Amino acid sequence: MDNMLKPIGFFDSGIGGISVLKETIKILPHEDYIYFGDSKNAPYGTKTTNEVKKLTFEAVNFLLSKDIKAIVIACNTATSAAIDDLRKFYKNIPIIGIEPALKPAVELKKRGKIIIMATPMTLSEKKFNNLMNSYKNDNDIEPLPCAGLVELIEQGLLEGEELNFYLKNKLQPYLNSNISSVVLGCTHYPFIKKELSKILNKDIEIIDGSLGTAKQLKRQLLKENILNPKLSLGKVEILNSLNDDNIIELSYKLLNYQ
């Protein structure tokens, strides 16, 4: 098959990467996509680096068997654990990762604390700490590990009392301080933006890395000259390691979720 016409592979530890796929479809509507979520092994954010690396390599091999032209690791935890090794191993295919959108938060130049909500593993990885250290001299950055939040979202809990209680509990220590922005450092978290904004002051910016990743993918496709030339809209196929129709149904629902 002509490289240009091949689909783009998307991978996440579950349904979270759908938030990145949504942004990508807006920017690259003529591409075909194969999305693979590993909900059977979710969450990744509480596993060891080696476990996450192994699962990510297995997922990438699975996507490569589908004859794709590029891969997006639409998972912050998998990116921080495995992206460098993946790029060394698979040199002939563009591999795009995602990281917490700290740079856009810093560039707002707003006074106050930048809170980074992410999984415990993302926050403990060297990759994230290097990113944070490059900004922390001039900014008040507060990492906030959110164990358990991915599980709620994987169950389809995107708003309501239980989620509100969880978020209030997490953010309670900061609600009376001056917060400039909240960075969503896990691709699952954009789906709970609505509930989050009920708790936060309305002038607090909520930022995620989806758009930056989508733009980077487009740059890579242009560089490799493999943008899909067709004028019709692309197709999306969603697969999941959980042999369960509900998770596929939820994935398609989230893809069209406003």
Image (cartoon, rainbow, N blue to C red):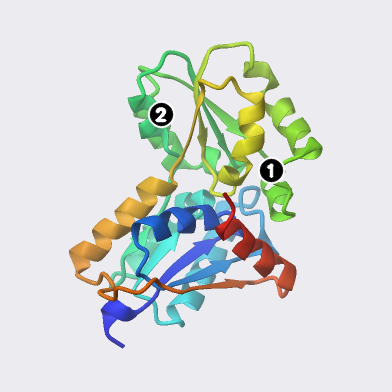
Q: Nearer the viewer, residue 15 or 196?
A: 196
Secondary structure beneath label 1 = helix
Please determine whether, in this image, residue 54 is positioned above or below residue 43.
below
Q: Is residue 53 above or below residue 161?
A: below
Rendered location of residue 115, percent (x, y): 53, 26
Q: Is residue 237 above or below residue 18?
A: below
- Residue located farthest toward the front when viewing the structure as drawn: 232
- For the residue labelled by badge 2, is the local secondary structure a helix, a strand or a loop? helix
Question: CA gap, disc 2 to disc 1?
Answer: 22 Å
Q: Tell me which amino acid carries mark 2.
A: Ala
The residue lying at 69 percent from left, 43 percent from top is 149
Q: Nearer the viewer, residue 21 or 172?
A: 21
For residue 13, what is the image quadrant? bottom right
Residue where numbered disc 2 is placed: 105
Question: Which x, y percent locates residue 189?
Answer: 59, 43
With respect to residue 58, does 41 lie above or below?
Answer: above
Q: Position of residue 6 (x, y in %)?
A: 35, 79
List the residue tagged with mark 1: 149
Query: Of residues 144 and 22, which is closer to you in this image?
Result: 22
Q: Quadrant of residue 242?
A: bottom right
Give the left or right position of residue 124, taking residue 41 as reference. left
In the displayed structure, does residue 226 sit left or right of residue 31? Answer: left
